[in-house]
Image: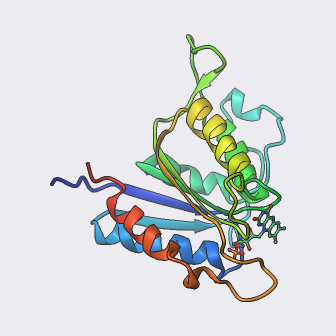
Amino acid sequence: MEIVMKKILIVQGGGRPKGNTAQLVQAFAEGAKDAGHTVETVSLLKQEVKGCLGCNACRYGKPCIQKDSFNEMVPRILEADLIVFASPLYFWTVSSKIKAFIERFYCIAQEDPNPPLGRYEKYPVKDSALLMTSADNFFWTFEQAASYYQFAVVNYIGFHDRGMLLAGGCGDTNGKPQIQQTDWLEKAYAFGKKIYEE
Ligand SMILES: Cc1cc2nc3c(=O)[nH]c(=O)nc-3n(C[C@H](O)[C@H](O)[C@H](O)COP(=O)(O)O)c2cc1C
């Protein structure tokens, strides 16, 4: 079995600093590191990334005009083979922090003279994955989050999906994180370890 070493960038889109999502990220990262990959995590709790303003300065060769952490993240995004989006489920979709981070991909789009139907520009080609936690655990719990990821990240931006780990039933935020009482941390470790296993 051959494993290719990859550069993985995990974007932790909020949740409590030691909460369910942070623990899920940690377990995934450990699995991926044990498989030999390089893993870097950026936390949108520590580094602020605001939503796009639609000023279009980036369409005229300028970096994003917003003075937050996104511009310094751009080289890390461009270097990464795999970008992992991690978020708690907030009001049935990804957190506003992950949404804002994805909006800012607007400024790394490149001109595409011949885009496919429904697309207007092209993006650097990367692999991607989605890690999420929630309180509920119904079959519809992650429907909107998974759909948003599929539409925006996979279909539109064009990233190649390596999978989603949707950890339902981790308890609400009115108390201690409960993910340790589930088997999601073992699953996240295994997901990280096998993400590039053929
Ligand atoms: C503002 C807010 C909105 C939430 N919305 C949902 C929701 O729509 N569905 C759900 O199942 N859980 C919801 N939850 C619960 C969290 O998704 C769940 O507790 C998650 O594991 C918290 O992650 P953390 O421990 O990393 O902070 C919400 C929690 C908060 C604070």
* Front position in the image: 5 or 93: 93
* Front position in the image: 184 or 24: 184
The image shows residue 72, relative to residue 25, as above or below, that is above
Q: Quadrant of the N terminus?
A: bottom left
* Front position in the image: 59 or 134: 134
Residue at image location 22% in from the left, 55% down from the top: 3
Residue at image location 53% in from the left, 70% down from the top: 25
Residue 37's spot in the image, x, y percent? 32, 62
The image shows residue 155, relative to residue 69, as above or below, that is above
Identity of the residue furthest to the front in this view: 139
Residue 149's spot in the image, x, y percent? 63, 44
Identity of the residue furthest to the bottom in this view: 176
Left-right relation of 129 to 139: left
Left-right relation of 19 to 50: left
Identity of the residue furthest to the left in this view: 1
Residue 160 seen anywhere in this rendered image of the structure: yes
Left-right relation of 114 to 168: left
Residue 68's spot in the image, x, y percent? 74, 58
Quarter assignment of residue 43: bottom right
Residue 125's spot in the image, x, y percent? 46, 36
Quarter containing ligand 1? bottom right
